[in-house]
Image: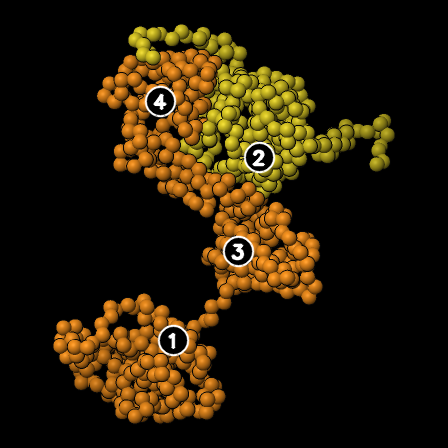
């Protein structure tokens, strides 16, 4: 490619070249790490790992919230396919419940639940769904089939379809993968409701999570404390975190065992 | 004996009378079959149902009579054949449908053979009684005016007739005269939706079979398009050279007519079925065993790459062909307030409950916001050991799956009474008090106490039913 000598490169030409290069390069697909937009995921493969076994439901809730978080208007009509391997009873917290999905920004009419036989069927169904233009939620768990090759395939398909794939991995799974981001999720105590019920315990506030961005392509790891409120994630300011209530000790009046 | 006579009177007249209930549907089916049978004289036949005992079949014999030796010979042979089946029949041949109808039912003078041929339209028509014009009740009104024969009204001013007796009379008169158009709506032979392909050389490779399936599907889909139908269930028969037949069946979520899609679904099946091709496949046949209406549709003018319902149905097809129909599910909702019954997942083939409709019709908001539910729900609630206030306080701590959880926040109880009218809830006829709780770590669970303390049980059991 013939290039002009540096001496004669004017400012406008430089700008033009920069613009061209930017167009050629794959756009920045990791999360933009500033402000409230920090959690908007790009097209591609993203992983969520619960910090412990008991954080699995919180990780799934985060996953569903992230799937629709900051989604472009035209993408909101895309179907969502939720693939889960059938028969992992020990690691199971139950099936997704359609009536609760709307609260996490997912209309159940759009969801297709696929209960695959084994890990290879899970991967096949996810790739198939991506090729059809769906957004995907996959529960991989600890599976040897989900390796660098499989994850790269998924990532490529997702990028070609400009779709998000969120994959739930096991909390002890440390296999490397080609995902854009990996989040480690644990639940945080939510703020108390300002009222107390007749029961003496405060009500449940907006759910909070501690999301550690362990791995991100083209960026440093980062720690987020976030809150799900009004159908969107909000990054909590440090000031808010400081006012977090201490663990209240339960009050025992009359007891039954 | 006449029509409309009381059964008792008829039996008094003829004690050996055979009685059968009136079955109009069966009569119509028989008449349809009979009309098809009449296709031996002309391909253009149609059943002509009438009053009981006056059913008819119309046969357009234009250009067919000479094959049987002329009109006389044709109608003689036809009536003989019909009577040979044990039916009583009259016939008429006329230049117009209306006249033939009238002459067959109301012949002015019955010929000994039971048929007549109208050579002179106006003479035959004028001799007909007015009932022979296919005008129903209007005939009785005409008779009140003393107009008994078609000849009586043929000379009257048309405008007056139309005003007094309705336009139908004039139209029928014109049709009987041949001055107005009338055509038969003939029976169409029912063709099955089937496409097959034969090969001079037997196919030995799977790729060749796939290609042939694709081309056969093209033929089938072209046929379906002309009929405005789409496939719901298709059988693929692979005929092996040595006479063995392999059968593969696919079902679709919605009627489809896309050959590429059908071929892709069969490719999945073919890849996984491990078919023994043996010495080769020499005939393949696609057979649509179930079809549904599918109107032609125009693709959008602006290239929208959004996934519409059709694509969604196709994706469902592909997933269910490979993974099994029972493994691909959509949200469904039932009319119940017991959580595990109220909503769940149903398959396309075996829908249970209606498709989920969360939004009210017309965009109206529901009166009450739906109660908060956990994201994950256990198929079978699991027992937990809980420390709770008596009688209906939330749990303060509980042990579930050998882990102790301290409760920090709680909401409840949400009291759900058992649905006593359902047989399956008789097994556990206890009220459930549901609590949403959050532990000191921030984990959320959904617990319930089975039974009200006091009236229902002395020792209520706690269960974990959902999480987050």
Residue bearing the label numbered 3:
B234
Residue at 35% across, 75% down: B48
CA gap, disc 2 and disc 4 = 33 Å
CA gap, disc 2 and disc 3 = 28 Å
Q: Earlier in the sequence, mark 3 or mark 4?
A: 3
| Residue B152, placed above or below residue B349 | below
Give chain B's shade.
orange
Q: Residues within 10 Å of mark 2 (few under 14, many from 20)?
A: some
Measured as percent of width and height from the top left, residue A50 is found at: 55, 21
Task: Please report, as a chain letter, where disc 1 is located.
Answer: B
Task: Please report, as a chain letter, where disc 4 is located.
Answer: B
Chain that is coloured yellow in the picture: A
Q: Is residue A249 visible?
A: yes
Q: Secondary structure at mark 4?
A: strand
Q: Secondary structure at mark 1?
A: helix
In the foreground, B260 or B403: B403
CA gap, disc 3 and disc 4 = 48 Å
Residue at 39% across, 76% down: B35
Q: Quadrant of the N terminus of chain B?
A: bottom left
Q: Quadrant of the C terminus of chain B?
A: top left
Measured as percent of width and height from the top left, residue A133 is found at: 58, 40
* Quadrant in which residue B456 is drawn: top left
Residue bearing the label numbered 1:
B34
Residue B151 - label = none
Residue bearing the label numbered 4:
B448
In the foreground, B166 or B134: B134
Residue bearing the label numbered 2:
A118
Q: Secondary structure at mark 2?
A: loop
């Amino acid at each position: 490619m013939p290039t002009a000598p540096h001496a004669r490169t004017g400012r406008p030409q430089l700008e033009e070249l920069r613009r061209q290069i930017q167009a050629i390069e794959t756009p920045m697909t990791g999360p933009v790490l500033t402000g409230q937009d920090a959690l908007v995921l790009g097209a591609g493969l993203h992983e969520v790992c619960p910090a412990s076994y008991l954080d699995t439901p919180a990780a799934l809730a985060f996953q569903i919230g992230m799937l629709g978080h900051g989604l472009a208007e035209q993408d909101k009509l895309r179907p969502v396919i939720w693939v889960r391997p059938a028969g992992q009873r020990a690691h199971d917290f139950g099936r997704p419940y359609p009536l609760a999905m709307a609260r996490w920004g997912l209309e159940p009419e759009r969801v297709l639940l696929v209960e695959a036989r084994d890990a290879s069927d899970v991967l096949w169904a996810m790739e198939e769904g991506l090729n059809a233009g769906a957004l995907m939620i996959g529960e991989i768990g600890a599976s040897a089939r989900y390796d660098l090759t499989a994850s790269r395939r998924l990532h490529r398909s997702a990028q070609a379809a400009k779709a998000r794939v969120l994959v739930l991995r096991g909390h002890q799974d440390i296999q490397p993968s080609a995902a854009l981001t990996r989040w480690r999720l644990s639940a945080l105590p939510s703020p108390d409701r300002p009222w107390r019920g007749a029961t003496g315990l405060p009500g449940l506030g907006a759910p909070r999570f501690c999301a550690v961005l362990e791995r991100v392509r083209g960026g440093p790891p980062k720690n987020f404390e976030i809150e799900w409120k009004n159908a969107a994630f909000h990054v909590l300011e440090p000031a808010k975190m400081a006012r977090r209530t201490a663990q209240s000790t339960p009050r025992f009046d009359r007891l039954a065992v | 004996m006449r029509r409309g006579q009381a059964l008792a009177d008829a039996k008094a007249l003829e004690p050996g009378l055979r009685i059968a209930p009136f079955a109009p549907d069966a009569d119509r089916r028989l008449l349809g079959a009979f009309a098809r049978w009449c296709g031996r004289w002309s391909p253009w036949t149609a059943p002509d149902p009438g009053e009981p005992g006056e059913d008819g079949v119309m046969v357009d014999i234009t250009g067919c009579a000479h094959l049987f030796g002329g009109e006389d010979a044709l109608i003689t042979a036809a009536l003989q054949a019909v009577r040979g089946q044990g039916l009583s029949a009259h016939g008429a041949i006329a230049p117009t449908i209306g006249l033939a109808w009238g002459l067959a039912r109301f012949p002015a003078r019955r010929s000994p053979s039971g048929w007549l041929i109208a050579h002179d339209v106006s003479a035959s028509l004028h001799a007909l009684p007015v009932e022979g014009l296919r005008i129903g009740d209007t005939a009785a009104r005409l008779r009140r005016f003393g107009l008994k024969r078609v000849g009586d009204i043929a000379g009257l001013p048309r405008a007056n007739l139309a005003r007094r007796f309705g336009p139908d009379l004039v139209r029928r008169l014109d049709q009987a005269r041949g001055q107005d158009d009338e055509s038969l709506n003939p029976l169409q032979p029912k063709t099955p939706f089937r496409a097959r392909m034969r090969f001079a050389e037997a196919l030995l490779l799977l790729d060749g079979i796939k290609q042939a399936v694709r081309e056969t599907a093209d033929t089938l889909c072209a046929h379906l398009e002309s009929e405005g139908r789409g496939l719901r269930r298709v059988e693929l028969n692979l005929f092996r050279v040595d006479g063995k037949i392999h059968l593969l069946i696919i079902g679709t979520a919605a009627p489809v007519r896309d050959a590429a899609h059908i071929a892709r679904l069969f490719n999945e099946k073919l890849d996984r079925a491990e078919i023994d091709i043996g010495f080769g496949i020499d005939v393949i046949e696609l057979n649509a065993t179930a079809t549904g209406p599918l109107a032609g549709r125009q693709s959008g003018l602006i290239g929208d790459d959004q996934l519409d319902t059709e694509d969604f149905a196709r994706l469902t097809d592909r997933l269910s062909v490979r993974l099994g129909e029972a493994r691909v599910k959509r949200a469904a909702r039932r009319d119940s307030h017991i959580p595990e019954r109220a909503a769940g997942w149903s398959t396309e083939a075996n829908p249970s409950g209606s498709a989920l409709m969360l939004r009210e019709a017309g965009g109206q908001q529901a009166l009450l916001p739906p109660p908060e539910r956990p994201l994950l729900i256990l198929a079978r609630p699991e027992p937990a050991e809980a420390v709770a206030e008596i009688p209906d306080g939330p749990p303060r701590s509980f042990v579930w799956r050998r882990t102790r959880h301290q409760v920090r926040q709680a909401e409840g109880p949400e009291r759900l009474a058992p649905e006593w009218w359902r047989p399956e809830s008789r097994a556990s006829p206890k009220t459930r008090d549901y609590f949403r709780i959050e532990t000191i770590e921030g984990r959320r669970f959904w617990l319930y106490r089975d039974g009200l303390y006091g009236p229902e049980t002395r020792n209520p059991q706690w269960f974990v039913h959902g999480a987050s």
